[in-house]
Image (cartoon, grey):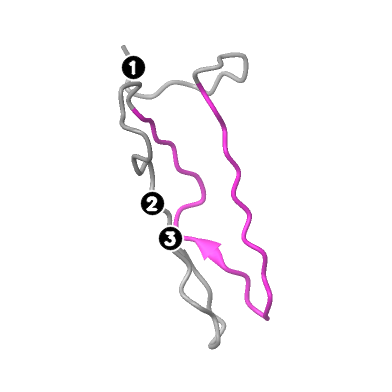
């Protein structure tokens, strides 16, 4: 079995998520990686952290993005 499967929108076991961060100042915030693929076990406990993303914003007044 391959370790990476192509996303299949017809498969209810798969979900594609898009995250957008709105810019308030001069510089746009940006994720450190443009695309990320991850998975979660079917028997994972509720509220299991699946993925942690990080973004950066070069504005001097920007709050940390976590």
Q: Residues within 10 Å of mark 1 (few under 14, many from 20)?
A: few
Which residue is disc 1 drawn over? 2
Residue 38 image position (x, y, % from top left): 40, 35
Residue at x 34%, y 39% (from the top left corner) = 48
In the image, which is nearer the foreground, mark 3 or mark 1? 3
C-beta proximity under 8 Å, tags 3 and 1: no
Above-or-below relation of 19 to 54:
above
Image quadrant where residue 59 sits: bottom right
Q: Secondary structure at mark 3?
A: loop
Which residue is disc 2 drawn over? 52
How far apart in space, not on screen, are marks 2 and 1 (Cα)?
Answer: 24 Å
Residue 33: within the magenta? yes
Magenta span: 14-40
How far apart in space, not on screen, are marks 2 and 3 (Cα)?
Answer: 7 Å
Residue at x 59%, y 49% (from the top left corner) = 19
Mark closer to the chain start, 3 or 1: 1
Above-or-below relation of 8 to 46:
above
Viewer-proximal residue, 6 or 13?
13
- Image label count: 3
């Amino acid at each position: 079995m391959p370790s990476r499967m192509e996303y299949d929108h017809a498969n209810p076991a798969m979900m594609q998520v898009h995250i957008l961060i709105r810019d308030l100042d001069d510089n746009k915030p940006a994720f450190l990686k443009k695309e990320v693929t991850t998975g979660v076990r079917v028997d994972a406990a509720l509220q299991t952290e699946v993925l942690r993303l990080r973004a950066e914003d070069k504005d001097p007044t920007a709050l940390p993005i976590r």
